[in-house]
Image (spheres, rainbow, N blue to C red):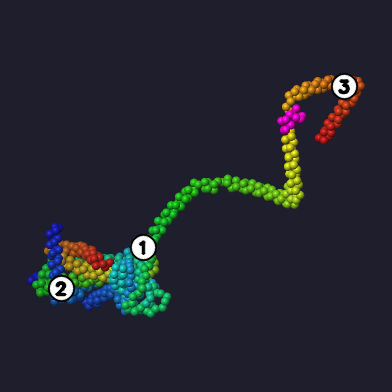
């Protein structure tokens, strides 16, 4: 892949994103379809995201415990696990899981519709396919990934609570106070805000790959695959960007 | 045409039949749970930073706030009663800290409370500690400015410790030198000598004996002096007899008289010798008299030799022989008696 093709791809994606905004703010709004996409992207991803979040929190706690006990700092485990989950682990794990599940779903669905010419048929029938298919999905992903992240954080923290209680004893009040005492708005808000961008990037890339899929069944597989890969990569890049920006703003 | 058929047959399939009402309820519950979690966290953080409780702002001027940040805790007796609301630089040596204080804690924070900058634990956040003073004072009101003190900072303590360490290094060095010198010194060898106690013990025994003898000598001296004091013995007589002095004076006077007489006699003798009158001159200076004396003495010698011969002849004379024999026998008997007495004594 040459530099010019990368630049061309970036330009196309940017134009695609601009089109999403342009179409998105123009009535009439596809509310029903949006809610349905929210249900698919958000609610149906919850078991997967919740499970990974739970395992992440538990593993993190159990792994951290021997080291912290060695330093005599087992009272710091909730703080460390809480900070890790809320700031990085929750958003990243959720972003990756959503990129894997939803990104591939969107890429495969839109590319198959493109391959079977359903998208062309929609435009012929008077329905704006871009508004109906792309804007709803991108918006749904943008709105649902933060919710999924918050829930994943909550489940992960509950898992950490369980993990601490397997080796020692703590109460919900103490656990909560230990975390909240060290937590600031500067820790929580950037972590939540960046997940909107994660969701937007996942939805946008999935839709882009699916919407501009090549003809043929081979194109469907490639679109699904590249939607996942590019989406995951975008999550990491955006996370790096978020860390740099929040450092610049003094929020850490 | 095929496209139209596809629309009528396929388009509704992925969307329309999958929208029962239950889905919306689940979605609503899902979103509300997520938002609820987020709001709960934000509320807890906001309550921690007193965003939702009524508060009043008080101030304090510090020289150094050691990295205090807006939002750090303000504590009274270790309990969080507020947060730092703002930090402004008044001038190059004064930092003004505005603190937002809970109204719940207002009655307990007195106007004479002292604010200090401290840390939460050894490496924790910087905080402001309010310390209550024993004297009575009204509660703080909004806009009050509290007094401040500078606590012993870790840097200052480390600085003092550094000086102490350097001093200690010098002290230990000289101590080490002293110990080395002591180790090689004669005193140490003396102290290390194992025979020393025995020797000292022996010496002490000798000293004991000597002192006993000294004591006896002193006793004797005491007796002697007592005797002298009482006038016993020659010394006592010498020192205590009252008449001795007078006698000594008399003797000396007589000695003087005698020596005068002697001097006069000698003067007379000398005159005789020098003038040639009197017998002394004849004895000492007349050579003719000396020759006559020598001749006379020789005549006497010859006379005594002749007398000796005459006596020997008398020994052998029968008239006197018996007497001489009796003499010899008496002498022999006396010798035998003395020998016998010596033997009995042994």
Badge 2 element? helix
Between A178 and B124, the one lying in front of the other is B124
Q: CA distance from mark 1 to mark 2?
A: 60 Å
Q: Is residue A214 left or right of residue A242?
A: left
Q: Residue at x 42, y 54 (%)?
A: B170
Which of the 4 image quadrants contains residue B328?
Answer: top right
Res. A59 mark: none
Q: Outermost residue, left direction?
A: B1
Badge 3 element? helix
Label 1, residues with CA under 10 Å away: few <14, some 14-19, many ≥20: few
Q: CA distance from mark 3 to mark 2?
A: 197 Å
Q: Is residue B13 above or below residue B194?
A: below
Q: Residue at x 16, y 75 (%)?
A: A30
Q: Which quarter of the figure is the N terminus of chain A placed in?
A: bottom left
Across and down, in percent, residue A105 comes to: 20, 67
Q: Residue at x 66, y 47 (%)?
A: B210
Residue ID for mark 2: A24
Instruction: Inspect this view and state whether residue B149 appears.
Output: yes
Kindly identify which chain the residue marked by label 3 belongs to.
Answer: B
Which of the 4 image quadrants contains residue B9?
Answer: bottom left
Residue ID for mark 3: B315
Between A105 and A198, the one lying in front of the other is A198
Label 3, residues with CA under 10 Å away: few <14, some 14-19, many ≥20: some
Q: Main secondary structure of the magenta part?
A: helix
Kindly identify which chain the residue marked by label 2 belongs to.
Answer: A
Which span is picked out in magenta?
A: B270-282
Q: Is residue B100 above or below residue B276?
A: below
- Of labels 3 and 2, the one closer to you: 3
Residue ID for mark 1: B155
Badge 1 element? helix
């Amino acid at each position: 892949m040459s530099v010019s093709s990368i630049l061309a791809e970036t330009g196309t994606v940017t134009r695609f994103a601009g089109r999403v905004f342009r179409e998105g703010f123009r009535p009439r709004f596809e509310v029903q379809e949006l809610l349905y996409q929210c249900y698919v992207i958000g609610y149906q991803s919850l078991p997967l995201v919740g499970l990974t979040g739970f395992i992440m929190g538990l593993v993190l706690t159990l792994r951290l415990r021997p080291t912290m006990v060695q330093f005599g700092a087992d009272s710091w485990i909730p703080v460390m696990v809480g900070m890790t989950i809320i700031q990085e682990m929750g958003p990243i794990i959720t972003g990756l899981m959503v990129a894997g599940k939803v990104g591939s779903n969107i890429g495969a669905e839109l590319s198959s519709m493109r391959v079977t010419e359903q998208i062309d048929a929609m435009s012929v029938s008077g329905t704006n396919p871009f508004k109906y298919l792309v804007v709803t999905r991108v918006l749904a992903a943008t709105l649902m990934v933060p919710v999924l992240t918050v829930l994943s954080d909550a489940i992960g923290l509950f898992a950490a609570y369980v993990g601490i209680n397997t080796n020692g004893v703590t109460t919900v009040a103490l656990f909560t106070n230990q975390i909240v005492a060290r937590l600031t708005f500067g820790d929580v808000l950037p972590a939540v805000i960046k997940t909107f961008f994660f969701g937007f990037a996942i939805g946008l890339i999935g839709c882009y790959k699916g919407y501009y899929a090549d003809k043929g069944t081979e194109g469907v597989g490639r679109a699904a695959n590249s939607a996942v890969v590019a989406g995951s990569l975008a999550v990491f890049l955006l996370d790096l960007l978020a860390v740099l920006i929040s450092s610049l703003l003094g929020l850490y | 045409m095929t496209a139209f058929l596809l629309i009528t047959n396929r388009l509704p399939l992925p969307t329309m039949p999958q929208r029962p009402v239950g889905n919306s309820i689940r979605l609503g519950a899902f979103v509300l749970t997520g938002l609820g979690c987020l709001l709960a966290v934000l509320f807890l953080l906001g309550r921690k930073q007193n965003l939702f409780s009524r508060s009043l702002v008080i101030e304090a001027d510090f020289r150094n706030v050691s990295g205090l940040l807006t939002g750090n805790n303000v504590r009274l007796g270790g309990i969080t009663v507020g947060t730092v609301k703002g930090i402004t630089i008044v001038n190059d040596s004064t930092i003004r800290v505005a603190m937002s204080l809970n109204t719940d804690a207002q009655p307990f924070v007195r106007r004479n409370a002292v604010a200090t900058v401290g840390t939460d634990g050894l490496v924790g956040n910087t905080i402001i500690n309010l310390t209550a003073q024993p004297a009575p004072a009204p509660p703080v009101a909004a806009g009050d400015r509290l007094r401040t003190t500078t606590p012993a900072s870790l840097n200052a303590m480390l600085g003092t410790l550094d000086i102490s360490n350097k001093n200690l290094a010098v002290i230990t060095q000289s101590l080490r030198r002293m110990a080395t010198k002591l180790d090689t010194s004669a005193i140490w060898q003396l102290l290390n000598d194992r025979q020393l106690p025995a020797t000292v013990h022996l010496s002490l025994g000798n000293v004991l004996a000597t002192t006993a003898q000294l004591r006896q000598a002193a006793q004797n001296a005491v007796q002697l002096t007592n005797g002298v004091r009482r006038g016993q013995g020659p010394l006592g007589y010498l020192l205590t007899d009252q008449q001795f002095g007078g006698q000594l004076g008399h003797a000396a006077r007589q000695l003087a008289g005698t020596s005068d007489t002697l001097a006069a006699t000698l003067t007379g003798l000398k005159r005789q010798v020098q003038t040639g009158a009197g017998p002394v001159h004849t004895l000492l200076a007349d050579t003719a008299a000396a020759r006559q004396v020598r001749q006379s003495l020789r005549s006497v010698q010859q006379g005594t030799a002749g007398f000796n011969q005459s006596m020997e002849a008398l020994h052998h004379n029968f008239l006197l022989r018996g007497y001489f024999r009796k003499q010899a026998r008496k002498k022999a008997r006396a010798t035998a008696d003395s020998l016998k007495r010596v033997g009995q004594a042994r």
